[in-house]
């Protein structure tokens, strides 16, 4: 039973006809071509599938796509604006805050969402904000540094 | 510039592997090609039989100077975060004298890249790197020869700079690599090592470069195997047994077939559902009703260790020097300990993934694998394809750590593509990833050692049960040593109930934990500061240099243990490199929880090609090492893996992050050694030793969980 679902995806009005009980993760990846959002565990424990829904970092691997009707979705592909990288993306490059890069989109989306709510987090708040995102390569200390740098840049209004 | 003194042989009709080389050249168009013959036959002999494809009939890498001046390096190595996509071009740029950005890596494609057994063992830079540098040096020699003819000046009068060959007497008389390659289809075979560039002249090697793939990885553009899509592609889920050793007895797939769009495919006990939508495949697979018979080993994570030491094992004396009886006589104090190490999972965030497509009689598989050629062989062997009819392509790999040397998912995807004649995407679930992982093997180490009145080690009787010997060297200067390994006696007993394999610095974590704990036990009993005790017993200059560097960085102040400070130290060797570590921990004596506050590590890895990438590898090793040290342990009953998710199998998190100080010793004049693994080997030992220093409690088993810490505290 397919249905029409309308929402905003990376700033564009989007309407798709789809089976509404599918998860947002696989609709994004397989129907909408947004493969930056990754599958890591399928049960919400790793954070690789995180996107922003109405500015809130949200895991998509267990979320029915019907839930996003009328909402604003931002994926890693839509985080930069006007061809410019988001400050968190820039800071990840600057700090070399990744290795294999597989958890990276989920990390960046979680951090970007955290900074929307709290533009000047303490180191401890950054740790708490990312605590439920897993990285196996062990880029943790550089990721924390990157998010700190990004928060400073964003406070400066850049 | 230096001329190479190599005789260059142009083969018009190469007698070996000609077809493969011809096809490379055909596929890749014009330019100048340099082929490499591997000279290290020993590397080849050490390969497992099924991977020992004859390298002598094949060529191990090659370079292409394309007609636009781009330099391409084709290698069977893969990029999984460890950074060769950045560091290999650094090495090549220096040998060829071209700007770094002109070099492109083409990695892990079995049709384009010559054979390579796999990316593991910290071998890319230390073994492949020198061969690749030699190819680059050869390429430069060829280009200078061509330039000499074109510019009509002797080669000795030419210098190479930024991809240009310049007449030193008349700098306007110059020609670019692109111009030299234009219209050429020149093949050169490299057989002898040419002279390499002097390390003092390196422009790129030894300087820090950030990951060249960072930009595409922060924007989501970077493609991993699961990100690919083909017309008509279906997702697969495979029916899995509940435990290793279980056998399917009855099955009813009718309910699965009712899930819209589902096709059930079956080949004996191999049953899978296919659906264009992944969520529907997930829904269908759980609707299959299956029953199994069980014939599992009667063993679990608690009884395993007794089973190992009690088994009728194959006993092998690996090393022996001096006389243990004399060692006993010379010793004033004797120490006997037994250390346990469990099964540990690789747990990369990307699960094993593969996309397979059958076109006519040719199978193409895009896979997350550390061994594209291994997978090619696996498909040829298991599914009856001729090897040249199988192409494996490796996109970016989302973490490997040894676990993606196993390629079961690639063979499964190919099998399903063959059965269904559709492009099949197989993305293992997290449950499958834990179930089919080739775990770090559990093991037991028993050590009997002795020291004299001065604190010199006189006896070292080392017994290793069911883990590998890597890292089991005594390191210390001991006159009476015996190292015995106990392995599976195939006729008598099966020990491991499921697959085991290489896990970052395979088995070295087990051996270094045991050895360095034992050293600490002896130092403490002798009433000697643990660093002083080690230095007293070490002769290895490189190890001593690492100790000096790390102690300086850490600000080490000597003290007898337990000092109450929570400082632990350890050292070891791995992948040709030397490492020494110091750590500080806090132990909550009420809860048993351990927080690692800071870690310092000094590493001698010979020539360090990319100090930035190497530091990142060291930091990654330390973080990952905290996992096996503090929480990671596979729980099992027979063949059933009980913890198959990140809720029950806990890997390191941000709140664990210690302050890290990593130092790489300057060894520019030496050969490069491994950098992806050494800094993980002693994390278990430094933390266990630090817990002892903080509390007096000694732990003999990783992971050092709160329950085990509390238990050990009771004995203080």
Image: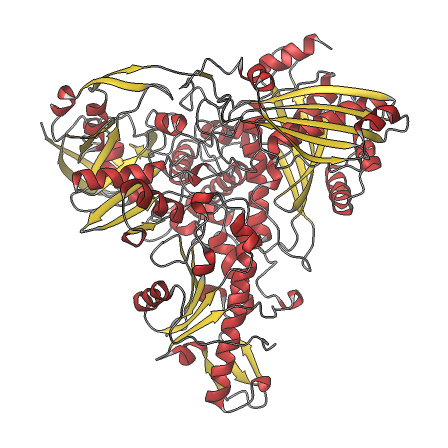
Does B716 sit left or right of A151 as displayed? Answer: right
Q: Position of residue A112 (x, y in %)?
A: 40, 37
Q: Residue furthest left?
A: A1
Q: What residue is rendered at 35% in x and 27% in y? A: B432
Between A35 and B147, the one nearer to me in the picture: B147
What residue occupies the far front of the structure in this picture?
B491
x and y percentages locating residue B361 in the rendered image = 20, 51
- In the picture, measured across the screen, residue B230 lies left or right of residue B339, that is left
Q: Quadrant of the C terminus of chain B?
A: top right
Quadrant (top left/top right/bottom left/bottom right) for the N terminus of chain B:
bottom right
Q: Is residue B37 above or below residue B181?
A: above
Towards the viewer: B483 or B659 = B483
Q: Residue at x 14, y 30 (%)?
A: B262
Q: Residue at x 86, y 28 (%)?
A: B455
Residue placed at 51% from the left, 43% from the top? A149
The reply to whether residue B556 is in sight is: yes
Quadrant in the rendering for residue B340: top right
Q: Quadrant of residue B464?
A: top right
Query: Looking at the image, can residue B399 be seen?
Result: no
Taking the view exactly as shown, the residue that stands out farthest to the top is B714
Q: How many marks?
A: 0
In the rendered image, residue B202, in percent from the top left (x then y), is placed at 61, 66
């Amino acid at each position: 039973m397919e249905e029409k679902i309308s929402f905003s995806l990376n700033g564009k009005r989007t309407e798709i006809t789809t089976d509404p009980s599918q998860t947002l993760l696989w609709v994004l990846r397989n129907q909408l071509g947004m493969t930056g959002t990754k599958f890591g565990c399928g049960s919400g424990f790793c954070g690789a599938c995180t996107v922003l829904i109405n500015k809130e970092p949200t895991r998509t691997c267990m979320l029915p796509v019907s839930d996003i009707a009328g909402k604003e979705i931002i994926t890693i592909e839509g985080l930069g604006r006007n061809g410019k990288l988001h400050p968190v993306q820039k800071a990840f490059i600057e700090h070399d805050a990744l290795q294999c890069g597989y958890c990276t989109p989920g990390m960046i989306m979680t951090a970007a969402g955290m900074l929307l709510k709290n533009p000047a987090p303490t180191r401890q708040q950054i740790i708490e904000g990312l605590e439920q995102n897993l990285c196996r390569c062990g880029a943790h200390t550089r990721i924390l540094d990157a998010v700190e740098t990004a928060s400073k840049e964003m406070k400066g209004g850049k | 510039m230096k001329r190479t003194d190599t005789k260059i042989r142009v083969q018009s009709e190469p007698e070996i592997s000609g077809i493969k080389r011809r096809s490379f050249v055909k596929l890749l168009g014009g330019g100048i090609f340099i082929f490499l013959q591997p000279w290290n036959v020993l590397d080849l002999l050490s390969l497992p039989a099924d991977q020992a494809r004859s390298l002598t009939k094949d060529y191990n890498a090659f370079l292409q100077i394309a007609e636009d001046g781009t330099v391409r390096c084709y290698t069977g190595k893969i990029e999984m975060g460890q950074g060769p996509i950045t560091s290999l071009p650094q090495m090549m740029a220096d040998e060829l004298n071209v700007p770094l950005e002109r070099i492109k890596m083409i990695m892990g494609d079995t049709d384009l890249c010559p054979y390579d057994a796999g990316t593991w063992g910290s071998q890319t830079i230390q073994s492949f790197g020198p061969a690749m540098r030699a190819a680059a040096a050869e390429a430069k020699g060829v280009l200078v020869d061509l330039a000499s003819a074109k510019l009509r000046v002797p080669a000795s009068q030419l210098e190479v700079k930024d991809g240009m060959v310049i007449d030193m007497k008349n700098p306007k008389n110059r020609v670019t690599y692109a111009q030299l390659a234009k219209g050429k289809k020149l093949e050169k075979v490299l057989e002898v090592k040419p002279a390499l560039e002097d390390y003092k002249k390196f422009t790129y090697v030894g300087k820090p470069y950030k990951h060249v793939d960072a930009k595409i990885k922060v924007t989501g553009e970077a493609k991993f195997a699961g990100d690919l899509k083909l017309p008509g592609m279906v997702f697969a889920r495979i029916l899995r047994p509940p435990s290793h050793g279980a056998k399917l007895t009855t099955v009813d797939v009718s309910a699965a077939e009712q899930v819209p769009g589902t096709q059930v495919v079956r080949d004996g006990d191999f049953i899978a559902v296919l659906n264009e939508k992944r969520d529907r495949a997930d829904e269908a697979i759980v609707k299959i009703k299956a029953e199994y018979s069980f014939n599992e080993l009667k063993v679990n994570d608690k009884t395993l260790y007794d089973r190992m030491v009690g088994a009728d094992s194959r006993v092998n004396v690996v090393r022996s020097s001096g006389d243990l009886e004399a060692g006993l006589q010379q010793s004033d104090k004797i120490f006997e300990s037994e250390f346990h190490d469990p099964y540990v999972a690789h747990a990369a965030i990307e699960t094993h993934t593969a996309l397979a497509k059958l076109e006519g009689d040719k199978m193409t598989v895009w896979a997350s694998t550390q061994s594209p050629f291994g997978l090619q062989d696996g498909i040829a062997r298991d599914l009856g394809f001729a090897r040249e009819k199988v192409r494996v392509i490796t996109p970016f790999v989302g973490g490997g750590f040894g676990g993606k040397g196993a390629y079961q998912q690639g063979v499964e995807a190919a099998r399903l593509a063959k059965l269904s004649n559709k492009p099949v995407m197989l993305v293992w679930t997290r449950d499958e990833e834990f179930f089919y992982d080739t775990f770090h093997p559990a093991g037991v180490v028993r050590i009997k050692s002795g020291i004299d009145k001065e604190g010199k080690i006189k006896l070292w009787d080392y017994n290793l049960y069911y883990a590998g010997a890597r890292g089991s060297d005594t390191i210390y200067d001991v006159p009476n040593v015996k190292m015995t390994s106990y392995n599976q006696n195939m006729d008598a007993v099966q020990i491991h109930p499921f697959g085991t394999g290489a896990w970052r610095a395979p088995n070295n974590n087990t051996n270094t934990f045991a050895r360095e704990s034992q050293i600490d036990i002896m130092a403490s009993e002798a009433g000697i500061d643990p660093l002083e005790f080690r230095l007293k017993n070490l002769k290895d200059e490189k190890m001593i240099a690492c100790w000096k560097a790390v102690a300086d960085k850490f600000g080490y102040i000597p003290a007898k243990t337990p000092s109450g400070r929570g400082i632990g130290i350890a050292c070891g060797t791995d992948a040709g490199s030397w490492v020494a570590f110091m750590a500080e921990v806090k132990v909550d004596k009420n809860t048993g929880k351990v927080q690692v506050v800071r870690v310092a590590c000094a590493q001698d890895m010979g020539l360090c090609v990319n100090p930035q990438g190497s530091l990142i590898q060291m930091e990654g090793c330390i973080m990952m090492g905290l996992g096996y040290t503090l929480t990671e342990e596979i729980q099992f009953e027979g063949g059933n893996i009980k913890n198959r998710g990140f809720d029950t199998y806990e890997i390191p998190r941000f709140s664990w992050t210690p302050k890290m100080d990593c130092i790489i010793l300057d060894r520019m004049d030496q050969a490069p050694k491994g950098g992806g693994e050494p800094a993980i080997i002693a994390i278990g030992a430094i933390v266990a030793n630090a817990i002892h220093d903080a509390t007096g409690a000694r732990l003999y088993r990783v992971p050092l969980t709160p329950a085990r810490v509390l238990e050990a505290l009771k004995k203080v």
